[in-house]
C-alpha cells in the first residue's frame, strides 16, 4: 500500500468530474490560472480539450510523410535495382526500366511504411509501452476508462502549492479532489 | 447524467437512431465489457466453437493431405489450372473489404453509424484475410518454397518478377493484412485499457494491461491517438481500393476472354464491398440477438448496410452488363463465344444462379419492410455471399475451361478435397470469430461513448 510518508513525494492533485463539459471548463480555468504541468483524462476523446492544455501540434503527420516517402523510394529502388541492374530480363525488347508496372508495389510499400510510421509514431510520442504511471494510483482512476473525467495538476508545476491548488481545483465543483502519490 | 425525459415521441425517434434505449457512458461500457468479463461460459457458445473447430480440423487435414500428395488431389486440371483455390481466395479477400471500408472510408466521411460495427467488421477483415492468404500459399504446390514470393537476396541470384500482377498481389495482400492489423490494434488500445480497469481477476488485468501498453486516456494521448487514427484511415482507404484492384489485375492483365477487360478493377472493388457488407449482416443479425446488443447495433445500422448492398450491387450489375455489351460491341468472336458459353454452356446454371443471387434478389432491399425484417436481411445477405462465390466461379472456371482452341477444352468437377478445404476455411474463420467475441470488446466502447451525448441531444430536439 502507498502511504503518505516523506519518501513518497506527492505526484499531484487530481480532481474528478462527472461530465466532459465540466472537465473542459475546469481545464480551461486551470490553464488560465497559470498551471501548465497538468493533464486531463477522459474515457473518450473530447473535442478541443487538448487546446485548453496548450497542446498545439504533434509530429506524427511528419513521421507519416517520411515513412511514405521511404516506402515509395524503397519500392522504386528495389525494383529498379533488381530489374535493371542485378537481373535484367529482356522480354521482347521492352525497356528494363518499365516503371508503369512498378507502380503497384511502390504504392503498397508507401502505404505500408506510412502506416508503420503512424502506428509506431503514436506509440513513441505517447511513451508506450509504459506499464506504470503514478496517476494509476489516483483514487477512482479506474473510472477514467469508463465514465470518470479527471484533471491532474502535477506537483512539479511551477506555481503548485498544495493548499492553494487544492482550493482552486475545488472551486471548479469537482466530485472530489484527492492527492496522488507515486 | 441520465436526466433525459422519456416520452412517447422520443421512442419513435429512437427507432431511426443509431443508439436505442436510455444509454449513458457507463451503460455502454458495462454492456460491452460484460460480454467478455462477466458473462458465463454458455453451452451454445461452446457448441458453436466446437463446430467451428471441427471445420478448422478439416482444413488442417485437407492441407496435410495436400502437402503429402500434391495438387492432384484437387479437381484442377489443364486448362482449368485455377479453380476452388483462387475462387476462395478472391471470395475471402472480397469479404475482408467491408471491415476496412467501414472503419476507414466511413471514418473519413464522418459517418457515426460506423462506430458500433467497425471493431467487429475489422476483426472480420483480419480473419477473412487469414483465410484468403491460406489459398494462394497452398495452391503453390511447393508450400515449403512460399518464401520465394518475397524479394530477398539469395544464392540463386534471382528476383521475383516485379512486372507480374501475381507479385503485386503478394505485396497488396500482405500490406493489407499488416495495415488492417495495425489499424485494428490501434483502435483496440483504449478499450483494452477499459478492460484492464474493469477486470477483477489479476491475470486478466495483467493480460489486458500489457496489451493496453499503459494507456491512461490523457488529453495528450487522445490528441496523438486521433491524429494517428485519422492518418491510418487516410492510408487504409486507398489501400482497400487497391487490394481488390490488384486482385482483379491478376485476371485483367492476362489475354483470356472473360478476364481481359478494363471494367474489372472497379467492378471487383464494388463486388468486394458488396459481399463484405453481406457478411457483416450475416454475422451481425445472430450476434446482436445472442448477446443482447440490439441497442448498440440497431435496425438503423442494418438498414444502412442493406442500402450499401443495393448501391454496390448495382455497380456489380453494371459490370455484368458491360461484360455482355462489350462482348457484342467489340465483335471479337472469342469474347462473343465466351458470353454465349456463359449463357447456355455447360456451366450456364452457375451463371444464371449468379445473376439471380447478385442482381435480382438484392433488389428486394429497395422495400423498407424487407430492410427492417431480420429474417429477410439474414437470408438475402447469405444469398449475396453465395452469389459472390458463384461470380468468381463463373469468372475463373467458365473462362478457363473453354479457351481459344477446342482441342484443349475440358470440364472442371471439384473433388472432395476441394470442398473440404473450402469448408475448412469457413471453420478457420468462425473459430477466430467465435473466440474474438468472448475475448475482446466486439464494439468500440470509447467510440460509442462519444456519440451517447449527441444522440441524446438529437432525440431531445424532436
Image: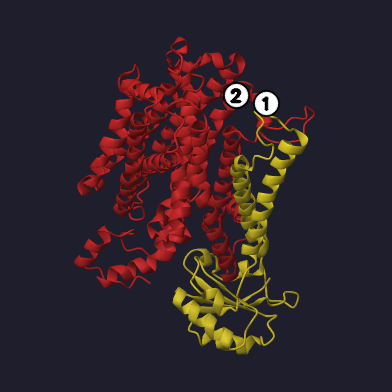
| Front residue of B442 and A110 | A110
Pinpoint residue A127: horizontal percent, then vertical percent: 68, 63
A126 to the left or right of B59: right
Indicate the quadrant containing the C terminus of chain B: top left, top right, bottom left or bottom right.
bottom left
Q: Report which colour depicts chain B.
A: red
**Residue plotted at (62% across, 84% down):** A35
**Residue plotted at (49% across, 65% down):** A44
Check the image and name the residue furthest to the right.
Answer: B155
Q: Quadrant of residue A27?
A: bottom right
Q: The chain shown in yellow is which?
A: A
Disc number placed over residue B109 in the picture, else none:
none
Pinpoint residue A45: horizontal percent, then vertical percent: 50, 67
According to the image, label 2 marks what residue?
Answer: B140
Judge the density around disc 1: few (<14), some (14-19), many (≥20) Cα neighbours within 10 Å.
Answer: few
B60 to the left or right of B462: right
Chain under disc 2: B
Using the rendered image of the protein, determine whether residue B316 is visible from the camera's viewpoint: yes
Q: Are marks 2 and 1 on the same chain?
A: yes
Disc number placed over residue B145 in the picture, else none:
1
Check whether the beta carbons of the residues at disc 2 and disc 1 lie within 8 A of each other: yes
Amino acid at each position: 500500500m502507498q502511504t503518505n510518508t516523506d519518501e513518497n513525494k506527492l505526484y499531484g492533485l487530481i480532481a474528478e468530474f462527472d461530465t466532459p463539459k465540466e472537465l473542459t471548463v475546469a481545464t480551461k480555468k486551470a490553464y488560465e490560472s497559470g498551471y501548465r504541468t497538468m493533464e486531463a483524462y477522459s474515457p473518450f476523446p473530447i473535442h478541443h480539450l487538448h487546446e485548453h492544455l496548450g497542446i498545439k501540434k504533434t509530429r506524427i503527420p511528419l513521421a507519416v510523410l517520411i515513412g511514405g516517402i521511404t516506402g515509395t523510394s524503397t519500392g522504386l529502388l528495389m525494383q529498379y535495382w533488381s530489374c535493371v541492374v542485378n537481373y535484367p530480363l529482356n522480354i521482347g525488347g521492352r525497356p528494363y526500366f518499365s516503371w508503369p508496372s512498378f507502380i503497384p508495389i511502390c504504392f503498397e510499400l508507401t502505404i505500408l511504411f506510412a502506416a508503420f510510421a503512424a502506428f509506431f509514431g503514436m506509440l513513441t510520442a505517447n511513451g508506450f509501452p509504459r506499464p506504470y504511471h503514478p496517476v494509476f494510483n489516483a483514487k477512482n482512476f479506474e473510472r477514467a476508462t469508463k465514465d470518470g473525467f479527471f484533471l491532474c495538476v502535477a506537483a512539479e508545476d511551477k506555481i503548485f502549492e498544495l493548499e492553494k491548488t487544492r482550493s482552486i481545483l475545488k472551486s471548479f465543483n469537482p466530485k472530489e479532489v484527492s492527492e496522488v502519490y507515486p | 447524467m441520465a436526466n433525459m425525459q422519456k416520452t412517447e415521441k422520443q421512442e419513435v425517434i429512437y427507432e431511426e437512431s443509431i443508439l436505442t434505449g436510455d444509454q449513458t457512458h457507463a451503460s455502454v461500457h458495462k454492456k460491452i465489457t460484460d460480454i467478455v468479463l462477466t458473462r458465463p461460459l454458455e453451452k451454445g457458445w461452446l457448441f458453436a466453437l466446437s463446430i467451428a473447430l471441427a471445420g478448422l480440423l478439416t482444413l488442417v487435414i485437407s492441407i496435410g493431405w495436400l502437402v503429402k500428395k500434391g495438387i492432384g488431389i484437387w479437381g484442377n486440371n489443364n486448362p482449368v489450372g485455377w479453380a476452388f483455390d483462387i475462387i476462395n481466395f478472391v471470395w475471402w479477400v472480397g469479404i475482408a473489404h467491408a471491415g476496412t471500408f467501414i472503419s476507414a472510408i466511413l471514418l473519413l466521411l464522418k459517418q457515426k453509424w460506423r462506430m458500433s460495427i467497425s471493431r467487429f467488421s475489422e476483426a472480420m477483415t483480419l480473419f477473412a484475410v487469414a483465410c484468403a492468404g491460406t489459398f494462394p500459399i497452398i495452391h503453390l504446390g511447393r508450400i515449403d518454397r512460399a518464401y520465394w514470393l518475397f524479394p530477398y537476396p539469395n544464392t540463386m541470384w534471382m528476383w521475383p518478377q516485379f512486372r507480374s500482377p501475381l507479385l503485386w498481389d503478394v505485396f497488396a495482400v500482405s500490406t493489407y493484412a499488416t495495415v488492417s492489423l495495425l489499424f485494428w490494434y490501434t483502435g483496440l488500445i483504449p478499450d483494452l485499457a477499459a478492460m484492464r480497469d474493469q477486470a477483477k481477476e489479476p491475470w486478466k488485468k495483467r493480460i489486458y494491461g500489457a496489451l493496453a501498453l499503459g494507456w491512461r486516456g490523457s488529453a495528450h494521448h487522445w490528441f496523438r491517438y486521433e491524429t494517428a487514427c485519422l492518418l491510418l484511415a487516410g492510408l487504409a482507404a486507398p489501400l482497400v481500393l487497391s487490394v481488390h484492384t490488384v486482385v482483379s489485375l491478376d485476371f485483367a492483365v492476362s489475354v483470356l476472354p472473360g478476364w481481359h477487360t478494363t471494367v474489372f478493377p472497379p467492378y471487383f472493388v464494388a463486388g468486394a464491398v458488396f459481399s463484405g457488407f453481406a457478411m457483416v449482416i450475416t454475422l451481425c443479425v445472430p450476434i446482436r440477438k445472442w448477446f443482447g446488443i440490439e441497442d448498440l447495433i440497431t435496425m438503423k445500422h442494418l438498414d444502412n448496410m442493406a442500402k450499401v448492398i443495393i448501391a454496390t450491387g448495382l455497380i456489380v450489375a453494371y459490370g455484368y452488363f458491360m461484360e455482355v455489351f462489350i462482348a457484342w460491341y467489340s465483335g471479337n468472336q472469342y469474347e462473343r463465344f465466351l458470353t454465349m458459353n456463359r449463357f447456355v454452356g455447360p456451366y450456364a446454371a452457375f451463371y444464371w444462379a449468379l445473376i439471380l443471387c447478385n442482381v435480382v434478389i438484392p433488389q428486394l432491399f429497395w422495400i423498407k419492410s424487407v430492410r427492417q425484417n431480420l429474417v429477410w436481411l439474414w437470408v438475402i445477405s447469405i444469398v449475396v455471399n453465395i452469389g459472390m462465390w458463384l461470380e468468381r466461379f463463373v469468372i475463373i472456371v467458365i473462362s478457363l475451361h473453354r479457351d481459344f482452341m477446342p482441342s484443349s477444352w475440358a470440364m472442371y468437377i471439384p473433388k472432395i478435397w476441394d470442398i473440404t478445404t473450402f469448408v475448412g476455411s469457413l471453420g478457420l474463420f468462425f473459430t477466430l470469430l467465435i473466440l474474438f467475441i468472448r475475448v475482446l470488446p466486439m464494439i468500440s466502447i470509447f467510440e460509442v461513448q462519444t456519440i451517447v451525448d449527441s444522440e441524446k441531444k438529437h432525440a431531445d430536439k424532436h
